[in-house]
Image: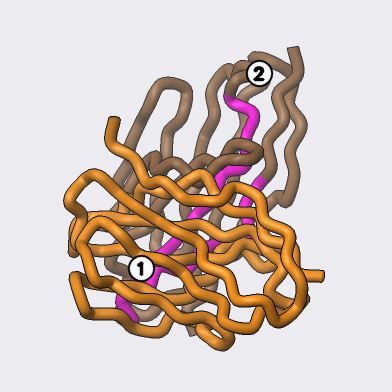
């Protein structure tokens, strides 16, 4: 059964304090791993797609990396506006996107 | 502006009273889907549609119906809502074969 586990559930950072969010997955035939950002009261917003181990994608202060068992979302020198819930999802042979429960990130000034 | 529009944003209803949540997208996407989001369970797919008149069940379809008569619209129908359908609902769309979904802003449904 395809499964996605995100850790930690919640993360509090001081502004400028870099850290990483983890997404561990088990999936039959990985076809893609996706990161989304969700702000309170809003729908998820697509950030990145990673297709194969070793691949990396960057957007502003965010960098996503992928191995055969997990993905990391690295946040460099975060700002308060980076506060959100970050969701990870995987797509495998079932052709269904399976979401994790997310990491709630709070960045304090 | 490219977007997915859901209505209503908030809805409180009573058990058994039929309701419809509308979803419309202006990006000419073939694929549309409904999800529910519950604490600790993440986003779970209810129904999806690959194109007009083509719909299929997701992981939690019980108690829901959908239709896709037009490419832009994908309403979610609860014919006899029950309290366990209290949840936050999202509609999403994309081009077939891509999974960077565009999500709507959500509908928070409470069934009492």
Quadrant location of the C terminus of chain B? bottom right
What hue represents chain A? brown
Residue at screen point 31% across, 60% down = B73
Q: In front: B28, or A109?
A: B28
A64 vs A17: above or below: below
Q: Which residues are magenta?
A: A82-103
What hue represents chain B? orange
Residue B47 sits in which quadrant? bottom left
Image location (x, y in percent) of residue B69 = 24, 71
- Pointer 2 local density, CA inside 10 Å: few below 14, some 14–19, many at least 20: some
Report how many numbered discs are placed on residues in the image.
2
Q: Is residue A99 within the magenta segment? A: yes
Q: Is residue B109 within the magenta segment? A: no
Query: In the rendering, which numbered label is found on residue A91?
Result: 1
Residue at screen point 75% across, 19% down = A108
Residue labelled with disc 2: A80
* Mark with earlier residue (2, 1): 2
Confirm or deny contact between disc 2 and disc 1 (CB under 8 A). no
Label 1: element kind: strand
Image location (x, y in percent) of residue A72 = 50, 46
Residue at screen point 17% across, 51% down = B28
Q: Are marks 2 and 1 on the same chain?
A: yes
Quadrant location of the N terminus of chain B? top left
């Amino acid at each position: 059964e395809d499964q996605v586990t995100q850790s930690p559930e919640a993360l509090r950072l001081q502004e400028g304090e870099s850290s990483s969010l983890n997404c561990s997955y088990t999936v039959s035939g990985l076809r893609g791993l996706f990161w989304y950002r969700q702000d309170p009261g809003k729908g998820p917003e697509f950030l990145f797609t990673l297709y194969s181990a070793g691949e990396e994608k960057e957007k502003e202060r965010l960098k996503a990396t992928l191995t055969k068992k997990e993905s990391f979302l690295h946040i460099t020198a975060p700002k308060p506006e980076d506060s959100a819930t970050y969701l990870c999802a995987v797509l495998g042979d079932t052709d269904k996107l399976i979401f994790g429960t997310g990491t709630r990130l709070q960045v304090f000034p | 502006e490219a977007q997915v529009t859901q209505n209503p944003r908030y809805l409180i209803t009573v058990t058994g009273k039929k309701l419809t949540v509308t979803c419309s997208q202006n990006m000419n996407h073939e694929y549309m889907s409904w999800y529910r989001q519950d604490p600790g369970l993440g986003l779970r797919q209810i129904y999806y549609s690959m194109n007009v008149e083509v719909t299929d069940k997701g992981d939690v379809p019980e108690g829901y119906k959908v239709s896709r008569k037009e490419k832009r619209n994908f309403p979610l129908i609860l014919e006899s809502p029950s309290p366990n359908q209290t949840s936050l609902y999202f509609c999403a769309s994309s081009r077939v074969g891509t999974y960077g979904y565009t999500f709507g802003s959500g509908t928070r449904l409470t069934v009492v």
